[in-house]
Image: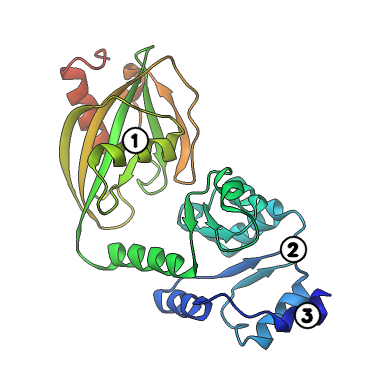
């Protein structure tokens, strides 16, 4: 029935615009679908979209291994790869592949079911995906100052939480990220920590703001303003890493002192130690 009726279904609004924006921005595209590959190829030919995709992974009843193969075979960096789907299984597959999980709220599953799987982005329509791609392109192509917020999380044991990321050339650093337009600092701080570590943080003490101008440790030339807080975390809860993190864990100040830290993190830890938040290593 799919083969008989697939040409009756129109594209969602703005899909051609999305594909052309991706081509213009140099974004490589692949498909992962439960629909058999031969049918997908026929459908793409019918829609004149067959030249947009690098790889087509059809017949994927279980998308977890198929998406992992696509990411590996295409040479995509997981922390720069967005997978958008409209079922809970799509979000599960994105998390398993370590890529950015995008929920298409305009598709098959309800918004509640999709959000329950903790997607990194939730798109109300296709235009929202275009907006994200354009925003990332703008940050990468224009010389702008980027404000970020992050924090030193300290457990009751005196240990601190560190994450190792590809974007900092494999070095360890503090969890955090970019502030959204119109978002208050502390709201951004709590959101970023929740997204990157899975931990909910309420209280935060101001620590410092650092200039980070085209650091050779960062993979790409950027001018960041790094706004740092310190938060006490009751107990020693198990963190949950997201697509940005290669590793995550709690470390004593003594262990952190000899780790391969990025320089802003080392400076923040030294300042927090002088102010009595950490025991001197």
Callouts 2 and 1 close, C-beta under 8 Å: no
Q: Which of marks 3 and 2 is in front?
A: 3
Q: Along the polypeptide, which appears first: circle 2 or circle 1?
A: 2
Identify the residue at horizontal 68%, vertical 87% (top origin): 46
Identify the residue at horizontal 63%, vertical 61% (top origin): 70
Identify the residue at horizontal 48%, vertical 29% (top origin): 239
Residue position for label 3: 5
Residue 249 figure quarter: top left
Q: Is residue 237 above or below residue 59?
A: above
* SS state under label 2: loop
Q: How would you rate the neighbour count of disc 2 (Cα within 10 Å): few for under 14, some for 14-19, many for 20 or more?
A: some
Looking at the rendering, in which quadrant would you find the N terminus? bottom right
Q: How would you rate the neighbour count of disc 3 (Cα within 10 Å): few for under 14, some for 14-19, many for 20 or more?
A: few
Residue 190 numbered mark, or none: 1
C-alpha gap between disc 1 and disc 3: 47 Å
C-alpha gap between disc 3 and disc 2: 16 Å
Residue 149 figure quarter: top left
- Can residue 202 be seen by looking at this rendering? yes
Residue position for label 2: 34
* Residue 173 in the image, given as x and y percentages of width and height: 33, 36
- Can residue 97 be seen by looking at this rendering? no
């Amino acid at each position: 029935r799919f083969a008989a009726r697939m040409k009756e279904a129109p594209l969602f609004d703005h899909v051609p615009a999305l594909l052309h924006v991706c081509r213009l921005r140099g974004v490589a595209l692949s498909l992962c679908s439960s629909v058999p590959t031969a049918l997908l190829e026929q459908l793409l030919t019918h829609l004149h979209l067959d030249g947009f995709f690098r790889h087509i992974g059809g017949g994927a009843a279980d998308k977890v291994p198929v998406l992992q193969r696509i990411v590996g075979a295409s040479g995509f960096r997981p922390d720069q790869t967005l997978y958008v789907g409209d079922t809970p299984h799509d979000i599960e597959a994105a998390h398993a592949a370590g890529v950015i999980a995008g929920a298409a709220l305009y598709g098959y599953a309800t918004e509640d079911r999709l959000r329950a799987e903790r997607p990194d982005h939730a798109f109300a329509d296709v235009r929202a995906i275009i907006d994200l791609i354009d925003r990332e392109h703008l940050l990468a192509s224009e010389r702008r100052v980027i404000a970020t917020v992050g924090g030193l999380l300290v457990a009751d044991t005196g240990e601190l939480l560190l994450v190792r990321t590809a974007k900092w050339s494999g070095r360890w650093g503090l969890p955090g990220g970019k502030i959204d337009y119109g978002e208050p600092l502390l709201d951004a701080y709590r959101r970023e920590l929740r997204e990157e570590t899975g931990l909910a943080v309420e209280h935060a003490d101001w620590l410092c703001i650092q200039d980070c101008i085209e650091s050779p440790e960062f993979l790409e030339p950027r001018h960041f303003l790094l706004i740092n807080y310190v938060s006490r975390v009751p107990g020693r809860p198990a963190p949950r890493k997201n697509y940005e993190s290669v590793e995550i864990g709690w470390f004593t100040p003594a262990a952190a002192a000899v780790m391969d830290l990025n320089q802003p993190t080392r400076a923040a830890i030294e300042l927090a130690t002088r102010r009595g938040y950490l025991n001197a290593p």
